[in-house]
Each structure stands twice: as structure tokens, then as C-alpha cells.
Image (cartoon, helix red, strand yellow):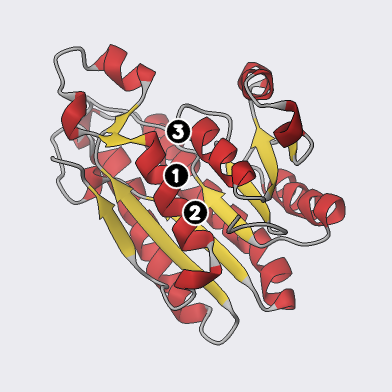
């Protein structure tokens, strides 16, 4: 098991993608803390985990756009599991259809908060624990939408483009600390929700949740400690 003895905080870890990633991280031996916002998502994850994995998976109700909540989450992970090795910023949201001059500022703020501010706050409060122990892995999630911009997706694309810039900035600031920061950039992720939203799409060309989980495990392992500041394009056949 590649991650045995490691502690991970996985934002969005009870969601459509996160539930698969969380299970894979647990199977690789990690202890996992899931900051959850909706109790039904957390309960759904718990209901689908084998008993032997539940013991290493804890949850905490958290609003990832509130700094005090994020700080408490990272401190809780350290108190429960003694250290913090891994931060996966999977949480996020998508809004599409409004051009810049049509968009309400609240929608713009929502995309920045969910996709970018949450990643910033989590990195800010996870990093002191990682740097203290000289070891850590941060992986953020961007999107192909910021490289292949479509009309009506500006707020989402800008927020996900910010993730790439944040990751590159972290790489420079973390030199010599033993902590790495990378990002993945998926295209369309094959989830039940995506299939419902895109009934005419071709899932064979999309990226599976299992492929993403495999990539994240590799980036969080010690065998890729030389990789930092990278943005891995998981585009499938698109």
C-alpha cells in the first residue's frame, strides 16, 4: 500500500468524484478526513464503505469558504491522526450559460469562492503542518475548460485557470520544504451526474473517476517527489 501511514484531507471527498478517490486512498492505507457540507453526501459515503475502511475515515462539517472552518479542519486532522501529509482539493462547482455582460456578480463570486478561494484557504492552513514535518503533497483540480474556453463559461474558466496559477506559485514558494504542489486538468469526468446532464455525449471519450484516482495516488506517493508545479492533462479522447 503506497500511502500507508499517511494522513489526507480530501475536500469534496464525499462527492461523485471524491467518493471514488476517497475509497482508493483508504485502500492504499491512508487515514482520511473529509470536510463535508451536506450531511447526506457524507452519510452516503459512509454507507458505501466497508467496515475496515470506515475506521480510517473521519468527517467534519465544514464551509470551505470560511477561513475559521478551514483552519479548524486542518487542525482536527492533525489532532486525530498526528500529522497531515496530503491535501486533495477536489471540491468545486460549475456554472454555464451567462456571458460576462449578462452575469450577476454573485455568480462570479460563487465560482471564485467554490473553485479558487477554497483551494487557497486549504493550502494556507494545511501547509504549516506539512512544512513543519518536511513532507507534504498538495494536488489541485483545474479543468480543460480554462484551456479550451467556451462562451458562457467565463467565471468557471477563470476560477479554474486561477488554480493553475496558484499551483505554479506554490511550487516556487515550496522549494526546499519537502512539500510538492501539482494540479490535474480533466476534461469531462464520467460520473452518473455527467451522464444525466449529457445524454447525447460519448462516455467512452471521457475520463473515468478510477483513472483520476490512480493519478492522484501516484502524485501523493513518495515515488513522484521530484514532480512539483506540474499540470497533468487528463483529457481522455477529447
Q: Position of residue 48 (x, y in %)?
A: 62, 21
Residue 92 percent location from the top left of the image: 45, 37
Position of the C terminus, as image quadrant, is top left
Say which label, 2 or 3, has the lower sequence index. 3
Report which residue position mark 1 lands on. Answer: 213
Marks 3/1: CA–CA distance: 9 Å
191 to the left or right of 78: left
Residue in view at x 31 percent, y 39 percent: 156
Left or right: residue 167 compared with residue 72? left
Question: Given contact means CB atoms under 8 Å apart, are the residues at marks 1 and 2 in contact?
Answer: yes
Q: Which residue is mark 3?
A: 17
Which image quarter holds the N terminus?
bottom right
- For the residue pair 5 and 62, the one nearer the viewer reads as 5
Q: Nearer the viewer, mark 3 or mark 1?
A: 1
Mark 2 sits on what residue? Answer: 217
Residue 61 seen in this snapshot: no
N-terminal-most mark, 3 or 1: 3
Q: Residue 36: name its quadrant.
A: top right
Amino acid at each position: 500500500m503506497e500511502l500507508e501511514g499517511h494522513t489526507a484531507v480530501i475536500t469534496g471527498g464525499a462527492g461523485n468524484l471524491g467518493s471514488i478517490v476517497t475509497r482508493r486512498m483508504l485502500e492504499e492505507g491512508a487515514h482520511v478526513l473529509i470536510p463535508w457540507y451536506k450531511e447526506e453526501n457524507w452519510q452516503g459515503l459512509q454507507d458505501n464503505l466497508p467496515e475496515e475502511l470506515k475506521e480510517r475515515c473521519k468527517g467534519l462539517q465544514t464551509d470551505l469558504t470560511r477561513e475559521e472552518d478551514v483552519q479548524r479542519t486542518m487542525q482536527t486532522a492533525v489532532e486525530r491522526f498526528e500529522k497531515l501529509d496530503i491535501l486533495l482539493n477536489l471540491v468545486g462547482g460549475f456554472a454555464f450559460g451567462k456571458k460576462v455582460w449578462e452575469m450577476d456578480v454573485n455568480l462570479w463570486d460563487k465560482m471564485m469562492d467554490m473553485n479558487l478561494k477554497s483551494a487557497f484557504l486549504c493550502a494556507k492552513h494545511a501547509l504549516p503542518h506539512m512544512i513543519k514535518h518536511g513532507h507534504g503533497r498538495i494536488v489541485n483540480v483545474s479543468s480543460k475548460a480554462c484551456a479550451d474556453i467556451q462562451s458562457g463559461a467565463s467565471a468557471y474558466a477563470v476560477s479554474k485557470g486561477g488554480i493553475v496559477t496558484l499551483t505554479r506559485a506554490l511550487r516556487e514558494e515550496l522549494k526546499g520544504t519537502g512539500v510538492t504542489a501539482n494540479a490535474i486538468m480533466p476534461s469531462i469526468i464520467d460520473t452518473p451526474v455527467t451522464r444525466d446532464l449529457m445524454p447525447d455525449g460519448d462516455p467512452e471519450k471521457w475520463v473515468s473517476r478510477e483513472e483520476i484516482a490512480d493519478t492522484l495516488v501516484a502524485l501523493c506517493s513518495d515515488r513522484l517527489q521530484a514532480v512539483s508545479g506540474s499540470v497533468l492533462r487528463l483529457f481522455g479522447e477529447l
